[in-house]
Amino acid sequence: MRYLISGGGTGGHIFPAVSIANALKELDPEADILFIGALGRMEMERVPQAGYKIIGLPVRGFNRSQPWKNVSVLIDLYKSIRQVKKIIRDFRPDVGVGVGGYASGAAMWAAANMGIPILLQEQNGFAGVTNKILKDKASKICVAYEGMERFFPADKIILTGNPVRQNLLSGRKSKIDNRKSLLIIGGSLGARTINEAIAAGLDQLAAAGITVVWQTGKTYYEKCKAIYDASPLHGGNEGGGCFDFLSDMPDRYANADLVISRAGASSISELCLLGKPAILVPSPNVAEDHQTHNALALVNKDAAVLVRDADAAAQLVPTALELINDKNRLEQLHTNVLKLAQTDSAKRIAEEVIQLAKKER
C-alpha cells in the first residue's frame, strides 16, 4: 500500500502526521509513505528526522489583512497543485491523508480530483479553514472533539482524538516531600503573556512553598532566567527551575499537581491522556481563535480552568495558588479530564486509512 500524507506549518500539524505514519508502519510494515509539505516550513526538517521522505511545495498562506498581495500566493498555489498532480502520477497513492495546513490543502484537493480517496484529521475543536474547504471531498474525517457536526458531514465523522506522545505515560514520580508542584509550559517558542504573569508573581510563588517548573520557550528564556535568578525562588526551588526547553516531559508531567498551558490541540490531548488538572490560557494569536474553542471543550465539562490571555497578568498566579492548594478541586478536575481522554488515537486513525485503502483496491 502507498500512503500520501500532507500537512504542517506548526508542530500541532506535524506531530499528528508523523504519529499516523508511524502507526501505519506498525500495522503495515511494507507500507510506502510519502509526505508533502510547504517549502521553508518546519515539516521539511522534522519529517526527515522521523525517517520519512518529504517533497516541498511553494504553497503559502493567504494574506487576510492585505488581500491585494495574494496574486503571487495564487500563482504559487497553482504551481503547487500542478506539482502535486505529477507527484501523484509518479507515486500512485492508494489514500491521501490531510492533517491541515497550507500544503495539505493543495495536496488533498489535487488527490481527490484525481480519484484518490482522502481522509482528513482535524486536531481542534474549531475546524481549520483547509479541512472545512476539503470536507465534501473527504471519505472520512477523524476528529478530536464531540460536536464537530457543526463543520463536517455527520456520516463522515469518526471520533478518534489526537495522536499524542505515548511515552508520556512512562513518567516517574520523584517527589521527596509533600511540596506541591506547578508545571508551566507555553510551547517550544514560549508564551509571552504567561511568562510575564509568572515573572511578576515569582515572589508569591516562592512564599507559597511550592515547586515551580517554568518552561519559558527559547524566545523568552534569557530575560525570564535573569528575573528568576534574582527572585527568592532561586535557590529554594528544589526539583524545579527555569528552562528554555524540557526534554524530560514524561517525568515533569508525572510530578505536576497543576499545569499552566496554552490550549493547543496536542497539549490538551496530553493533559486529557494524563488526567492533569490545568489552567488553560488560550493564545489569541491563532486563526479563528481555535485555542479558546479547544479550552472551552474542557471547561464546559468542568475538566479545566480558563484564564483568558487578557486577564493573565492579574489572575493567573492567584488562580494557580488557590487551585493548587485545593485538594478536592484538583481531584475533581483530574477525574473529569481523564474522562475525555482518547487512547490509541494514531492506531485508530491508521486503521481507518488502511480500511479506506483496501476498499479502494
Image (cartoon, grey):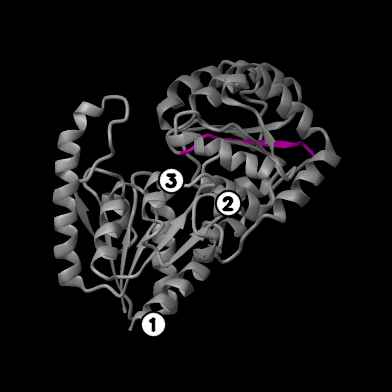
Q: Position of residue 60 (x, y in %)?
A: 24, 41
Answer above or below: position of 187 versus 3: above
Does 209 appear in magenta? no
Q: Which residue is tagged 3?
A: 128
Q: Which mark sits nearer the N-terminus, 1 or 2?
A: 2
Q: Secondary structure at mark 1?
A: helix
Percent coordinates x, y for residue 285 in the rendering: 45, 29
As helix, strand or loop, the secondary structure at mark 2 comes to helix
Counting other residues with Cα less than 10 Å from the Cα at mark 3, is it few (<14), some (14-19), or many (20 or more)? some
Give the amino acid at mark 1: Lys
Direction from residue 156 to residue 106 in the image, left or right: left
Identity, as a three-letter code, of the amino acid under mark 2: Ser
Q: CA distance from mark 1 to mark 2?
A: 29 Å
Q: Is residue 163 visible?
A: no
Magenta stretch, residue numbers: 178-187
Residue 139 in which image quadrant: bottom left
Q: Earlier in the sequence, mark 3 or mark 1?
A: 3
Q: Is residue 109 above or below residue 268?
A: below
* Label located before the other in sequence (2 or 3): 3
Tell me, for residue 358, which label it has, or none.
1
Residue under the point 49% across and 65% down: 156
- 195 versus 349 height, above or below: above
